[in-house]
Image: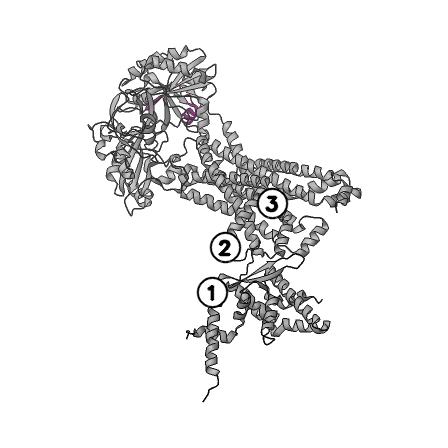
Amino acid sequence: MPDWKGEIRQRLAKLTLEPARESEIVEELAQHLDDRYRDLRAGGAADEQATRAVLAELSEGGWLARELRRIERQVSAEPVVWGARKINMMGDLRQDVRYGLRTMLRQPVFTGVAVLALALGIGGNTAIFSLVNAILLRQLPFRQPEQLVWVSARRADSGKYPFTLPDFIDYRDQNRSLDGIAAFANWSANLTDRGDPERLQGLRVSANAFQMLGVEAVVGRALLPADDTPGQERVVVLSHGLWQRRFGADPQTVGKTLTLNGAGYTVVDVLPPQFFFPIRETELAIPLAPDSDPWRGVRTSVNFLRALARLKPGVTREQAEADLTAVAQRLRQQYPVANAQKLGVTLSPLHEEVVGNFRLALWVLLGAVGVVLLMTCVNLANLALARAVARHREMAIRTALGATRRRLVRQLATESLLLAGLGGAAGLLLASYGVDLLLALGPASLPRTAEVGVDFRVLGFTLALSILAGVAFGLAPAWRATRVSLNDELKESGRGGAGGARQSRARGLLVVFEIALSLVLLVGAGLLAKSFLRLQSVDPGFEAKNVLVIRLSLPKAQYPNRAAAAAFYEKLRPRLSSLPGVETVGVVHALPLSGVFASIPFTIEGRAMAPDEAPRADYRLVSTGYFRALRIPLLSGREFNERDRAQTGSVALISRSLAHRYWPSTNPLGAHLMIDDNDQGPRPVEIVGVVGDVKHLSLDGEPAPHIYLPIHQTHEDAVVWLTNNQYWLLRTAVDPLTLSAAVRREIQAVDREVPASSIRTMEQYLAASVAPRRFNLWLLTVFAGAALVLAGTGLYGVMSCGVAQRRREIGIRMALGAQAGDVLKLVIGQGMAMTLGGVALGLVAALGLTRLLTSLLFSVSATDPLTFLATAWLLMFVALLACWIPARRALKVDPMVALREE
Amino acid sequence: MTHIDHRMLDRELKKGSAELMILSLIEARPRHGYEISKLIEARSGGALSFHVASLYPLLYRLEKRGWLEGRWVEKAGQRRRRYYKLTSDGRKVLAAQRSNWESFVAAIHRVTRPEHA
């Protein structure tokens, strides 16, 4: 019988029907023609005659093709893979999803690994993005936050200086560009009623501050400008956290009276939960009441006020800055001595002020974790490419059954999107824990942490990330997997390989890319690590080991003057000294690296200074044992001793840098400083010794010149600084923290009303001072480690797949006499070639990118050659390991077995 | 007299009555394409014949309209064949077409019958 199918196909060829549809039509028509032919033959026609008749009927003026074209075009272009008949997007999708789920269940290991890897990648990204979103992207929780600015005095030596109270009042009253300006100052309080006494960090704040910011009270009323008037009832505002923690969120708290520093304050307000003070631990605020402040009229007093302002509508920051600077100039003319150095005023956006320190670090971390996700996708893409090879047969069969390429790509894309979706969902779950972990590990100075959480933007980010990830690792392999040609399929299987050279090249390129990415992260982490190590080895000027630090605050009511404060010291010191394990006891009013800042103006007696020189130094009120407790070296002269009393001559110690600056070649001992720590004007103190420099503000800064005064000679006007804040330091022979309970007991024995809520070691303060750096380093190291593992496994995957594919080649080589060394060289050489390519690419990329890190580094160049080299070597070592295992496997190839497999 | 749908009439005239014949032939039971073509030829006494090139496009068109449904049926010891079955939509269409057709034929007949003086 003639080959009707060929004849039919020929006539249908131009229609380019879907293969499945075409073969169906061909089969049906061929049967018809068979029957027709048989009947014609049965009716007596000869073979040739019957054939001709049948073909004539088939042709009939091209009718068949013409009609079918019209009909079949309307019928869908898309026969469905598994025999469904209609075009149905949703139906197809359901089918794809079902099929995808089945495929995933059939390969639980691949699915598990992929979902876990994606969950970690997407979870990490979501967690970091939650921080970026809450801290950097979201507006500050105030009314029209873009109009809020941070106001600082500008001096020749610093653009951001606090204000004295009289200066603040002048700026408040004389500016023409601000809708409001509010000042605040640190203030801490001992809460002594209701249970255990507790020391709370608070603020004195201009009573208009909350109205200016646009913050509404949760319960009660906000502070009102009237609260600043002298003689008003004492009122206090609680943070949401304190209200919940200490008062069980009881609405009745408002209206109650709290005993703070021995005085009664009425609670008028609880602030909203997302409200934050400029200092994170701040839990309450009282009105600044500037008019009743003792510093009200003292131009030369301590600069202790920070200020916020709201610009008038339509006024730019530059205009306001010019306006306030004009006020500063007037004040400078009016008070040529006190305001000599106050050149102007700087305004910076409040948002920048709050989050600026963390901006770069957060973006870098987001970038790093993004790279990790990208590498996860690359690895999955590689894995999927390997599977695509394995699924080649499936694709070939489905194509033969009539599936179009687009349909297959869609099916495969659905599978990867399903994986990514599952990964994303799991990632979101992980992220919610991750965020808690980040906040727990994050530095205490990290702002706006109360606002961190999952919102629509974070959800959208995660969703977009999941889809991107799914597309990234799924689409390319899908495209490749579906480039099925039956011919190629036959040829490939004839060669015994599973995947062509092109496929291997694509996977090799992905690995090169991956190695480059991981090198960039490793270099970044390496630079941060080196900075951190450098910072750790910085000499802070004291010995932090085995020092216990107890922070105390004496209630103002009971300790109003120097005598009372001294009496407390005299009672507590012997008790603590006699505790077993305690070697030395010292007291300081502002602990190094605790973030407390204290400075005073001074002059040198008998030395003329230019009026605009007005030198300032950090100063510390310290007790006799302070230098020994911290092991700050005495360089010359003597330390304070028990004979330095209120009645004896005023003495001071200065730091080495101060001595160097003003007595570069002579001996400062015996000279007198005029220090300005009181209302009556500068008073003389005699320099009796020089001590070593101490890094008080931060480890990465230069040590500032210091003046030390004995606590017993604290001026009455400055006693409040001492009683507000005093740090007791115990140098111990034992683990310092084991003494905590005993220390607390002794303090209680001296005065029940004095709380000792903060007992920490000096090492903890030291660690806290580098916490932001540690946080960055820790995260970037985790990400870089993940990148290293991903690069290693990626390379390993490609190498082992390559070895599996080349079993036969290796077998033949060995049969022809190749030695183990030759085979190793072959395999490892190939892997290391990829690695070197990746390392070269990575080094170039890192050179460009690490510059961004510059401000996060400390005494390390962004292109530090040692770090670059070391990380490159580390990466190559890991790569060598990743190649070694497949290479060993290649050695075990038995030539006979490999050849017989054909 | 039944009303004649003029559009329908027009289309039937253009396309002939092939659809009506096919639907009628599978009304009683499903049949495959060759069987349908043989029945048309046999029942019309050889006056009408549908060859492969015109029959199958028509079948596919009707199938696409949802009037009939083709299904591959395997019988023991035979090749599988595609049988066409009338759908419920097809059944309604058939009834309508049949009555249209009868009206049409009757109308033609009335017009064309010889006049007796």
In percent of width and height, residue A140 lies at 35, 40
Quadrant into which the N terminus of chain A falls: bottom right
Given the current orientation, which residue lies at the most extreme bottom position? Answer: B117
In percent of width and height, residue A731 lies at 44, 16
Disc 2 target residue: A89
Magenta segment includes A675: yes
Disc 3 target residue: A382
Q: Residues within 10 Å of mark 2 (few under 14, many from 20)?
A: few
- Is residue A125 depicted above or below A58 in this figure? above
Magenta segment includes A393: no
Q: Which mark is residue A499?
A: none
Q: Cα distance, mark 3 to mark 1? A: 57 Å
**SS of the residue at dot 3?**
helix
Magenta residues (range): A655-679
Q: Amino acid at mark 2?
A: Met
Given the current orientation, which residue lies at the most extreme front position? Answer: B117
Disc 1 target residue: B92
What chain is tagged by disc 3?
A
**Where, by quadrant of the figure, is residue A4 drawn?**
bottom right
What chain is tagged by disc 1?
B
**Where, by quadrant of the figure, is residue A813 drawn?**
top right
For the question of whether residue A64 can be seen, the reply is: no
Do the residues at pointers 3 and 1 share their chain? no
Residue A621 is left or right of residue A178, and the answer is right
What chain is tagged by disc 2?
A
- Is residue B81 depicted above or below A684 in this figure? below
In percent of width and height, residue A690 lies at 42, 20
Which mark is nearer the camera, 3 or 1?
A: 1
Q: Residues within 10 Å of mark 3 (few under 14, many from 20)?
A: many
Q: Cα distance, mark 3 to mark 2? A: 29 Å
